[in-house]
Image (cartoon, rainbow, N blue to C red):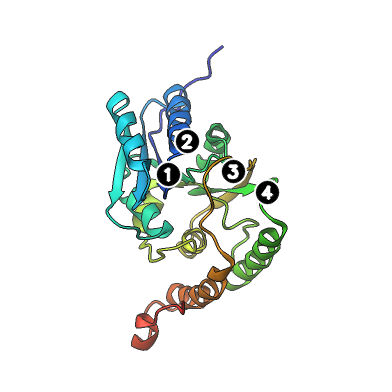
Amino acid sequence: MAKARFSTSISVVFPALNEEDNIRKAAGDAAAFLDAAYETWEVLVVDDGSTDDTAAHVRTMTEVEPRIKLVSHPTNQGYGRAIASGFAAASSELVFFTDADNQFDIRELRDFMPLIEDHDAVFGFRVYRYDSVMRCILSWGYNRLVRVLFRVKVRDVDCAFKLFRREVVDKMTIESDDFFIDTELVARTAKLGCRSVEKGVRHYPRTAGTTTVRPGHIPRTLWTVARMWFRIHFPGKQKPALAEARAPR
């Protein structure tokens, strides 16, 4: 027996940078799932200045399925800006984002739906991680730091499988232009007093493309953590020097 469709509309955002080998599967799988599970939906692929054929692949898909839409950045603006652009273009009651590298199964979004009925946001956490040992260790330490500084009870802040109610997204002013966006979204959700809950999701190895996360990002990330903590907790007391400061490169 076919499962009932959800009446709530949903926008799925895929930030994508040089994902020509992944984007057809990611967007295609999402469209197939959404068409079976939701009455109203859209897939928004945000091409963040890719230098390969990512955008061309999406344009071809939009000709067949107009609910798959392309949002383009002429030049690379960063992972955080890509998500922010997707959120701004989204038109549905629910807004969800995940990565375009096919390391998550979009069908697990169905398990988030009962939870979003009583919450403002649902954050995924990776049950198993197909990342290097060093990256897992760094992630463990980073998550502990974030939980203490931002007073959030989230075990996997960087998991790119997050669902929000539209009104939560509309209340946020996103500042991050890089991978700190995940932390900012969790921290701002908590600061707004929104109700959030976690749900485990499976994580799969990347089969194509390469990650853009590098160990050299650590110093900049730590600087961003400190700067964002001050901005979120003391929005009216920001000093000009701090407001204009840029992260060291």
Residues at marks 2 and 1 touching, judged by CB atoms closer than 8 Å: yes
Residues at marks 1 and 3 touching, judged by CB atoms closer than 8 Å: no
- The residue that label 2 is drawn on is 26
What's the residue type where badge 2 is placed? Ala
Disc 3: CA contacts within 10 A as few (<14), some (14-19) or many (>=20):
some
Mark number, residue 14:
1
55 up-or-down from 246: above or below: above
SS at mark 2 in the image: helix
Residue at coordinates 39% horizontally, 76% vertically from top-left?
235
Disc 1: CA contacts within 10 A as few (<14), some (14-19) or many (>=20):
many
Q: Let me know if residue 91 appears in the view.
A: no
Residues at marks 4 and 1 touching, judged by CB atoms closer than 8 Å: no
- The residue that label 4 is drawn on is 129
Across and down, in percent, residue 181 comes to 46, 60
- Position of the N terminus, as image quadrant, is top right
What's the residue type where badge 4 is placed? Arg
70 up-or-down from 88: above or below: above
Quick one: label 1 or label 3, which is nearer the N terminus?
1
SS at mark 1 in the image: strand
Residues at marks 4 and 2 touching, judged by CB atoms closer than 8 Å: no
| Spatial CA span between label 1 and label 3 | 16 Å
What's the residue type where badge 3 is placed? Arg
| Spatial CA span between label 4 and label 2 | 19 Å
| Spatial CA span between label 4 and label 3 | 11 Å
Residue at coordinates 31% horizontally, 30% vertically from top-left?
60
**Residue depth check, mark 4 versus mark 3: number of the one nearer the observer:** 3
Quick one: label 2 or label 1, which is nearer the N terminus?
1
Disc 2: CA contacts within 10 A as few (<14), some (14-19) or many (>=20):
many
Across and down, in percent, residue 214 comes to 56, 63
What's the residue type where badge 1 is placed? Phe
Residues at marks 4 and 3 touching, judged by CB atoms closer than 8 Å: no
